[in-house]
């Protein structure tokens, strides 16, 4: 078994112990929610800075209301009826 020299042990202490402290602080901050408000502010800023998205002409929203369901007579609407609707829209 290899014996570590005092110099090797000291080099591990220099990097290992501060690393553990930083990891522990980050975990503690995440668990207590200390950083959540800052994260939400940053997310809100990033969403505001985004360029405006253009409207895609290929998207169509079809609303089905209570009258439509009564006219068809069953709920949920049968797949056959939905398929024929898609064919008409395509």
Image: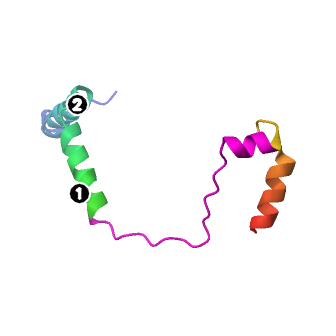
Q: Where's residue 67, x and y in %?
A: 70, 44
Q: Residues within 10 Å of mark 1 (few under 14, many from 20)?
A: few
Give residue 52's quadrant in the image.
bottom left
On whether residue 62 falls in the magenta region, the answer is: yes
Residue 24: image location, x then y, percent:
21, 29
Residue position marked by numbered label 2 in the rendering:
33
Is residue 79 placed above or below 83 in the rendered structure? above
Residue 45's mark?
A: 1
Q: Find residue 62 and report its horizontal and vertical position in percent.
A: 64, 56
Compute the Cα span from label 1 to label 2.
19 Å
Location of residue 47 (image quadrant) = bottom left
Asked if the stretch drawn in magenta spans residue 53, the answer is: yes
Task: Specify whether 38 is left or right of 84.
Answer: left
Magenta stretch: give its range: 49-71
Name the residue at 25% across, 32% down: 30
Query: Is the C-beta separation of discs 1 and 2 under 8 Å?
Result: no
- Kind of element beneath mark 2: loop
In the image, residue 23 above or below residue 38: above
Residue at image x 60%, y 65%? 59
């Amino acid at each position: 078994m290899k014996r570590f020299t005092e110099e090797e042990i000291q080099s591990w202490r220099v990097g290992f112990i501060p690393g553990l402290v930083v990891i522990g602080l980050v975990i503690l901050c995440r668990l207590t929610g200390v950083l959540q408000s800052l994260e939400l502010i940053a997310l809100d800023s990033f969403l505001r800075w985004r360029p405006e998205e253009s409207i895609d002409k290929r998207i169509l929203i079809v609303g089905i209301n209570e009258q439509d369901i009564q006219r068809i007579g069953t709920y949920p609407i049968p797949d056959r009826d939905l398929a024929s609707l898609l064919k008409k829209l395509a």
